[in-house]
């Protein structure tokens, strides 16, 4: 404790230490070393830094400059306009409330494919599209669209749909297209369901099983007043950044030679880390999104199959699709040909010893596959690999596998029901549809060179600071002896 | 009566003392344990005010002496404190 309290004494400002340092150190050797003393010396150091520290002027000046610069920048950020509309959801009388109606509808309309079409047709995010992949731009648009339940309107449920964009006219037009897609998707799904029911059972769907319909209550508005960025937040961020830069500047001013040496360590560390990161193979992630639609006629389907949630259904299918046998089949597929070096190593082993390492390879592939459920009735499957084309092919293979397995499971379930067996298509169960097909990744997900460089920078700064400190302030043996006595 | 500056002036009123001696003296006459950080924050302030001054010493432990200005300030503060104490005691007796 005495040692740490003595270390705290070095946190006092340099000018203060020049005057009081020796006598203060002598006192610290005499006082009882405990937490009370530790806290008191720390408090004193902070107090003195605030009163006498040389960092105050540059830090304060740069903090003010930062705040002014951030405020100036905030005035150049374009305003954003919110266009909104209201939709009424009309349900068939006595129909059970389908909790996932909104979820199913938005899954289609806000899919990557659908948003990409709107972005292109309305020429949205023009500058962003030039800089980042379209996939990222669709993600940005998804964040700018809000679909939320609104208050009850004449006994029916209502939805408030809004879109925020820097151009008020484009905000309204794009929202109009989004709404028309929602309406036509809703109409198409409902008529397809009824048509299919007629074909299968030669009778219309029961009223309780008919879908909900959408009507426009309030058309998209043309926003008049836009909202600018949060200027207070901008100023606070500028103040904080300026303050930190000021502290660094003060540190450099106090010891330019030392700061230069620490910077040298940091630069060397960044260079080594970056060189190392470029030796690691790039990894790419391809993903696809699938929608799980509700059974065409829940009452007939649940008579032959147990009622499970879409997520449980997918997890049941994944036991086969993501099982070791299927993954090994994909790995060894000559068209895909994954983990070639590892397989060559395994192939060199005696046949009897190949099973375990092959299973380990399948387990390794399983760890690179991520199943995500962003909404109750849709799921995303992603796979990461060093070859982006192969990553995409694997995702295609897996999505096809899920759809085929779903059909197979449905066929097995309806096998005992002659009426259902006669169907040309097995649309009675939960059906899988591809919302967004497998992507061809353009940017590697790992190694993250920027993160590694930042880590290297930090490590270099710490190492440089530690080296300089340990060189600069060796404790005299006599003082150490007194301190430990 | 817990102001470290006042306690230090009171401690130095009867003679020069270095930091550790002040801590021990204050502990003895006031029952208050001054931390090293608190003590030197107060010493710095008292020197800035010109109420105490450091003396030359061959030892690392530098003694401090109360100045005339410091003595007057201590007397004023004690006088004010004394008036408060006397008033409070008198009022307590009359209730």
Image: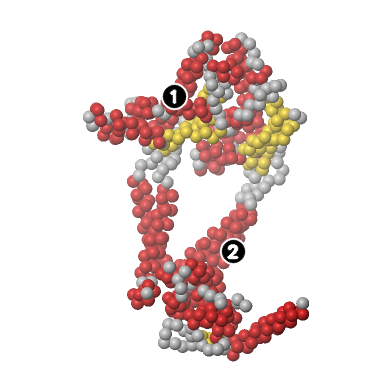
Nearest to N terminus: mark 2 or mark 1: 2
Secondary structure at numbered mark 1: helix
Percent of width and height locating residue A88: 71, 29
Q: Which residue is mark 1?
A: A401
Query: Where residue A326 sits in the image (x, y, percent)?
Result: 38, 26
Q: Nearer the viewer, residue A389 or A102?
A: A102
Q: Is residue A222 left or right of residue A461?
A: right
The residue that label 2 is drawn on is A64
Residue drawn at x 56%, y 59% as measured from the top left: A240
Quarter of the figure with residue B59:
bottom left
Please identify the quadrant where the C terminus of chain A is shown.
bottom left
Pick the quarter of the image with the N terminus of chain A: bottom left
Q: Residues within 10 Å of mark 1 (few under 14, many from 20)?
A: some
Residue drawn where x is 51% and y is 37% of the image: A135
> Above or below — where is A116 with respect to B80?
above
**Identity of the residue furthest to the bottom in this view:** B68
Pointer 2 local density, CA inside 10 Å: few below 14, some 14–19, many at least 20: many
Above or below for B55 versus A78: below
Circle 2 marks a residue in which chain? Answer: A
Q: Is residue A230 visible?
A: yes
Residue A427 seen from this side: no
Residue A144 vs A403, above or below: the answer is below
Q: Position of residue A33 (x, y in %)?
A: 45, 71
Q: Which circle marks residue A389 in the picture?
A: none
Name the residue: 37% across, 48% down. A277
Letter of the chain that mark 1 sits on in the rendering: A
Side (left or right) of A464 relative to A14: left
């Amino acid at each position: 404790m005495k040692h740490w309290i003595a270390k705290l004494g070095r946190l006092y400002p340099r000018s203060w230490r020049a005057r009081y340092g020796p006598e203060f150190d002598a006192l610290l050797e005499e006082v009882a070393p405990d937490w009370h003393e530790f806290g008191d010396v720390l408090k004193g150091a902070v107090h003195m830094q605030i009163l006498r520290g040389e960092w105050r002027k540059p830090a304060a000046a740069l903090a003010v400059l930062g705040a002014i610069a951030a405020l100036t920048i905030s005035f150049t950020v374009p305003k954003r306009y919110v266009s909104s509309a209201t939709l009424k959801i009309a349900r068939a009388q006595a129909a059970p409330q389908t909790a996932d109606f909104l979820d199913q509808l938005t899954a289609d309309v806000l899919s990557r494919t659908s948003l990409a079409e709107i972005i292109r047709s309305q020429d949205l995010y023009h500058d962003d599209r030039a800089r980042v992949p379209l996939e990222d731009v669709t993600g940005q648009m998804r964040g700018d669209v809000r679909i939320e339940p609104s208050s009850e309107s004449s006994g029916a449920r209502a939805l408030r749909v809004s879109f925020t964009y820097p151009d008020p006219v484009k905000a309204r037009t794009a929202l109009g297209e989004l709404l028309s897609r929602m309406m036509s998707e809703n109409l198409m799904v409902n008529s397809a369901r009824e048509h299919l029911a007629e074909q299968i059972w030669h009778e219309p769907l029961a009223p309780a099983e008919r879908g909900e319909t959408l009507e426009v209550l309030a058309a998209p508005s043309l926003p008049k007043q836009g909202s600018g960025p949060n200027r207070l937040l901008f100023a606070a961020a500028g103040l904080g950044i300026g303050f930190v830069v000021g502290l660094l500047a003060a540190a450099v001013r106090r010891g330019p030679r030392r700061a230069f040496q620490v910077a040298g360590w940091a630069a060397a560390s960044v260079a080594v880390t970056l060189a190392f990161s470029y030796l690691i193979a790039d990894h790419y992630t391809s993903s696809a999104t699938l929608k799980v639609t509700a059974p065409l006629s829940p009452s007939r389907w649940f008579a032959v199959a147990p009622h499970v949630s879409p997520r449980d259904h997918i997890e049941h299918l994944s036991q086969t699709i993501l099982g070791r046998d299927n993954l090994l089949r994909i790995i060894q597929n000559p068209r895909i040909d994954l983990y070639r070096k590892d397989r060559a190593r395994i192939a060199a082993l005696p046949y009897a010893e190949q099973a375990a390492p092959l299973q380990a390879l399948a387990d390794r592939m399983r760890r690179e596959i991520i199943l995500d459920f962003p909404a109750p009735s849709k799921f995303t499957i992603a796979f990461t690999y060093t070859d982006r084309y192969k990553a995409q092919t694997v995702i295609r293979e897996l999505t096809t596998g899920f759809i085929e397995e779903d059909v197979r499971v449905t066929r097995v379930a309806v096998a005992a029901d002659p009426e259902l067996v006669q169907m040309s298509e097995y649309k009675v169960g939960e059906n899988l549809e591809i919302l967004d097909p497998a992507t061809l990744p353009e940017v590697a997900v790992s190694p993250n060179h920027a993160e590694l460089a930042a880590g290297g920078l930090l490590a270099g700064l710490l190492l440089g600071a530690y080296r300089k400190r340990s060189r600069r302030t060796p404790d005299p043996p006599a003082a150490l002896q007194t301190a430990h006595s | 009566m817990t102001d470290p500056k006042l306690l230090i002036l009171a401690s130095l009123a009867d003679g020069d003392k270095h930091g550790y001696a002040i801590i021990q003296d204050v502990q003895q006459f006031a029952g208050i344990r001054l931390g090293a950080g608190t003590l030197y924050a107060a010493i710095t302030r008292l020197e800035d005010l010109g109420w105490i001054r450091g003396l030359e010493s061959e030892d690392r432990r530098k003694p401090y002496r109360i100045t005339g200005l410091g003595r007057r300030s201590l007397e004023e503060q004690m006088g004010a404190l004394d008036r408060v104490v006397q008033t409070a005691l008198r009022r307590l007796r009359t209730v």
